[in-house]
Amino acid sequence: MTRKITFGEAIRESTDQCMGKDPSVYIMGLGVPDPKGIFGTTVGLREKYGEKRVLDMPVSENGMTGIAIGSALMGMRPIMTHQRIDFMLLALDQIINNAAKWHYMFGGQMSVPLVIRLLIGQGWGQGPQHSQSLQSIFAHIPGLKVVMPFTPYDAKGLLAASIEDDNPVIFIEHRWLHNLFGEVPEESFTVPIGQARIAKEGKDLTIVSSSYMTLEALKAADTLINDKIDAEVIDLRSVRPLDEKTIIDSVKKTGRLMVVDGAWRFLSISSEIISIVVEKAFSALKVPPCKITFPDFPTPTSWALSNHYYPRAINIINQAQELFGLQQKNEEELGISPTGPLDVPDKSFTGPF
């Protein structure tokens, strides 16, 4: 049976179902048993499974990551969650030199079935040290898988697939997505890691995006129809492994590529995607590919700076208009309501982080 639930509820349901059918699955992290439950994604799990499988942890990222890796090597399937991706920089040694490498260092005889849930995205004026998007760092490392769901359906299915995977998976959630509703089956299911989804079919322009930026890309695509630009929107879902075939097939059809990446511009995932297309489908391109990213500056704190820092649908629309030699229009001319301060997504957003 399918019904509508939120992105956060989908994550909680997937966690619950995986813990229910596999006693080796447990969850740990800062604030896991907190009443707010990390945007509601862990609410009620300690009451159902007990404190031995739902663990609160101290502020010691490197230490807790080592515990998770050690238990994974001994046959457990830990889910480690953290409210901010920024703080996992303190655990890069454990993630890169241990979790990502054990399988290779021991000839495939060992595996590290570990899921690390990390939150990205702006919110509450958290600024340079609490709202970074660092997915490209993890995607750069052989031995790690990196997934970035956009819909509640994919959040549930990709989390289940990540928990069942024998490799370490970095599961990245944008905090603005937790209250997004979507249709999700009640029963347990998986979504294949490394398989992109065509969120909207089109014939004139390929827009590649992931996570929250897919929402902005779809908004832009709906408006671009008025300019007779039929954009195809690809939701990556996974950034490592990357579904190169879906991207290349789309570019061969449209002849134009725009990558919308919610991260910094230099050495980004968008740069890698453009490089792959230029290497493997250069003759299909009618115009040079382009990308929309954060500027190469630390993330701002103030609302005024945030409004200019984070890409929105209008930026995608204007870039597409430029690709087609059309006059650029502002939000008022396009009939798009300004989103206001981007520090909060809407009035319903109340935290906790």
Image (cartoon, rainbow, N blue to C red):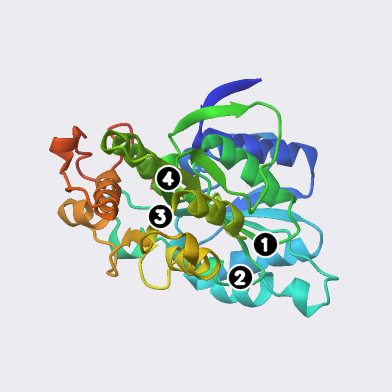
Lower sequence index among marks 4 and 2:
2
Rate crowding at label 3 as few (under 14), some (14 to 19) or many (20 or more) other CA atoms within 10 Å. Answer: many
Q: Marks 1 and 4: which is nearer the front?
A: 4
Is residue 145 shown left or right of residue 319? right
Q: Name the secondary structure under disc 4.
A: helix
Q: Which amino acid does the dot numbered 2 rest on?
A: Ile
How far apart, in angstroms, are the residues tagged by discs 2 and 3? 37 Å
Q: Marks 3 and 1: which is nearer the front?
A: 3
Query: Percent x, y for residue 130?
Result: 36, 60
Rate crowding at label 2 as few (under 14), some (14 to 19) or many (20 or more) other CA atoms within 10 Å. Answer: many
Rate crowding at label 1 as few (under 14), some (14 to 19) or many (20 or more) other CA atoms within 10 Å. Answer: many
Query: Percent x, y for residue 90?
Result: 50, 72
Task: Name the residue beneath numbered marker 3.
Answer: 256
Viewer-closest of 202 and 78: 202
Q: Marks 2 and 3: which is nearer the front?
A: 3
How far apart, in angstroms, are the residues tagged by discs 4 and 3? 18 Å
Q: Name the secondary structure under disc 3.
A: loop
Lower sequence index among marks 2 and 3:
2
Viewer-closest of 288 and 307: 288
Lower sequence index among marks 1 and 4:
1
Task: Name the residue beneath numbered marker 2.
Answer: 95
Determine whether 237 is above or below 92 in the image.
Answer: above
